[in-house]
Amino acid sequence: MDGLLQILNTTGFLNVTWGNILMLAAGIVFIYLAIAKGFEPLLLVPIGFGIVVGNIPGLLQQGLGVVNEGSVLNLLYFGVNKGIYPSLIFLGIGAMTDFSTLIANPKLILLGAAAQVGIFGTFIGALLLGFNVLQSASIGIIGGADGPTSIFLASKLAPDLLGPIALAAYSYMALVPVIQPPIMKLLTTPKERLIRMKPPRQVTKKEKIFFPVITFIVTAIIAPGGAILLAMLFLGNLLKECGVTERLAATARTSLVDIVTVLVGFTVGAKTTADVFLTPRSLGIFFLGAFSFAIATASGVLFAKLMNLFLKDKINPLIGNAGVSAVPASARVSQVMGQKYDPTNYLLMHAMAPNVAGVIGSAVAAGVLLGILGS
């Protein structure tokens, strides 16, 4: 009997709480949405499974949780906590991104800039909800729809909120196809949705090579705090475009980014335990995340409509949503929405311009906030 009781004490049955049960259910829902509904499975499957692992009753008591110093999960989470994984993801994003459309039509960078209104709107909202300045800045980056940047800034300014912020950012990135279409439809007219944009001009190889170098110098001078993220983004793109490092570019955009994505999703999910997530503060962050995505999407669409008042060659405002930096999910939403109203209208190549501009914009915004508040 004593032996049986000892075995029972080593299981999680004596430590299970309602919080554990709720979070296990949440993890299973994430996995379901990824597999059954196709919502960004590369993100939601590792995040959902990580939530399940992190909320197994008794895991912390056995010293195996993310917060247990020296555990495997704790060591894997080091890359999140120190901003290593976000930098490597940016390297992969750069290696898989074609900046041609942005180079060919640079005015579309304004749509990427407009969508960053979501960052500062959320920053103000977080302050009003009682978060301090550092926490509010970290929460605000969720509005850029950029998981790696959210992790990077939170690790520097608000490490105590890193888990909920990262989970909110990646969750809403995965839900872009659900959140954005109703807002886009509400803010555009049937006539605007049918606008056809001229094909972009052909960009030369020299332009593609010079762009990452020159743009890095300019943006890093503007926001030195974001220099690491920007450096990795533009290095990845230079590897892709220079023509002599294709093997490195292929590794960065495939194996490397896949490995890091699994580690980020799994460890962020494992960090989201019931005692951390099921609190008014964490739930407030999730509320602010939804608000920020809505504001960012609306800002991009409305700014495209504003630009059309002054442009001879009109912009289809359906690409305004792509100013949020969920690459390439938000650009795909532009394409799907456009073809819903005109099956022969192809907006993807145009939407990629504000999409990659949003990536740059969110990194610059993070660098500015880090420069102001991190010193």
Image (spheres, rainbow, N blue to C red):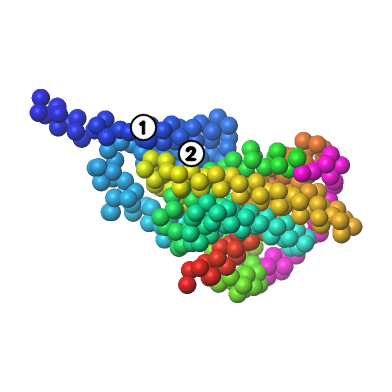
Q: Tell me where residue 141 appears, x and y as whole percent.
A: 56, 56
Q: Position of residue 315 (x, y in %)?
A: 82, 52
Q: Quadrant of the N terminus?
A: top left
Answer with the quarter of the image where residue 56 lies: top left
* Residue named by callout 1: 18
Check disc 2: other Cα within 10 Å, few if <14, some if 14-19, many if 20+.
many
The question of residue 14 being in magenta is answered with no
Q: Nearer the viewer, residue 277 or 281?
A: 281
Q: Is residue 358 visible?
A: no
Is 5 drawn above or below residue 158 in the view shown? above
Say which quarter of the image contains residue 172. top right
- Is residue 207 rendered magenta in the image? yes
What kind of element bears circle 1?
Answer: helix
In the rendered structure, which amino acid carries the disc numbered 1? Trp
Judging from the image, what secondary structure is the residue with disc 2 in?
A: helix
Q: Earlier in the sequence, mark 1 or mark 2?
A: 1
Tell me the magenta residue range. 187-211
Whether residue 296 is visible to the viewer of this picture, yes or no, is yes
What amino acid is at disc 2?
Val
Judging by the rendered image, the residue that carries numbered circle 2 is: 45
Q: Position of residue 14 (x, y in %)?
A: 24, 32
